[in-house]
Amino acid sequence: MRIRNALYGDLRIRTLKTLSMAGMIFLLAISLRATAFDYDGDNRSDISVFRSSTSAWYLQQSTNGFYGTQFGRADDGIVPADYDGDGRTDIAVYRPTDSIWNTTGVWYILNSSNGVVTYHVFGLATDMPTPADYDGDGLADTSVYRPSNGTWYRQNSSDGSFHAVLFGISEDKPTLGDFDGDNVADIAVFRPSTGVWYRINSSDGTVSADPFGLATDVTAPADYDADGKTDVAVFRPSGGVWYIKNSATGTLTAYQFGNSTDIPAAADFDGDGLADISVFRPADGTWYRKNSFTGSFFAFQFGTSGDRPTQAAYRF
């Protein structure tokens, strides 16, 4: 059985079987056919970094193992997403200023389906890239947020149509996700000065406001409770604490995991349909995470101090 997912494409429903002392427990979990940051298509997010000093992408794929390729420039923004609909994340960059084409806002995409590089001009040098599936066709749409005028611009992959939506002010940070669970990405921002999350729900066009966070928090939206909705969440560097507002119940959960210099990199690494709390520590190039399925602790050295985890691509 398949359903759609706003950020990552098709979803497959599978039944996971686990044994306990009480007998057999059947756990129904959502398995993403195109899990975020899953470069080999096995429904698990892969440990992965972009090294700007050499413009190199390094992936430790959970099934296919190590892969590295040079793609981009030092000043590029990384924009990994599934642009070709094959269920795998594509390596991609957003180039604020491109001397080759003498223009701004050039997207370069290495399509995982066929290895072909495509490019697309869309945006200004100061725009923030916000690719997601806003039209519900299972492919990431080219999209940017323009802080100078608080406007979201996008081109739908389904029909090539252009859309502009005024929503935000100059200080706002875009937050990508499907917060209302309709399998279409919502336009959403976090306002540091007030600690409020604002969004336009794509399901009915209503505007929601959630006071949640401090100005110094790092946004970390993801689906931590497996209800098909992105949860409002932040990482607070001062104490290394994660605060999550569970959309399924409305309850607040807090986890101390990380330190002040860590980069939050939550994603579904263990393939159970829930985002795992995870950080990348630049000081020693180590990934630390708490697996949501078993609660086990995981640490893996992969990267150097100058690397950017691809899971942090949209942490502005």
Image (cartoon, rainbow, N blue to C red):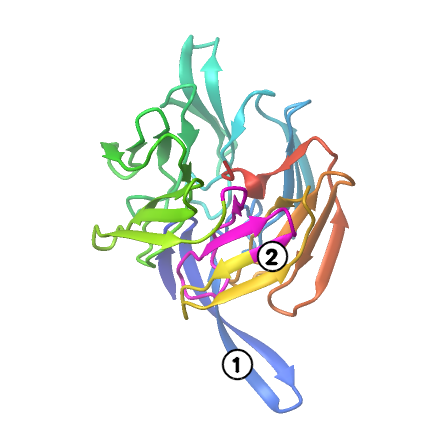
Q: Is residue 104 left or right of residue 237?
A: left
Look at the numbered disc 2 and give the secondary structure of its residue. Answer: strand
Outermost residue to the front: 194
Is 99 contained in the magenta span?
no
Q: Identify the residue at image location x=33%, y=55%.
A: 183
Residue 196 visible in this rendered orientation of the protein: yes
Nearer to the camera, 117 or 141 = 141
Give the distance between the C-alpha atoms of the residues marked 2 and 1, in whole angstroms. 24 Å
Q: Identify the residue at image location x=64%, y=41%.
A: 48
Image location (x, y in percent) of residue 242: 58, 56
Image location (x, y in percent) of residue 93: 51, 28
Q: Is residue 228 left or right of residue 282?
A: left
Nearer to the camera, 143 or 255 = 255
The amino acid sitting under disc 2 is Ile
- Quarter-of-image position of residue 145: top left
Give the position of the N terminus as an image quadrant: bottom left
Residue 272 visible in this rendered orientation of the protein: no
Q: Which span is picked out in magenta?
A: 215-242
Look at the numbered disc 1 and give the secondary structure of its residue. Answer: strand
Is 217 contained in the magenta span?
yes
Residue at numbered disc 2: 277
Image location (x, y in percent) of residue 11: 42, 58
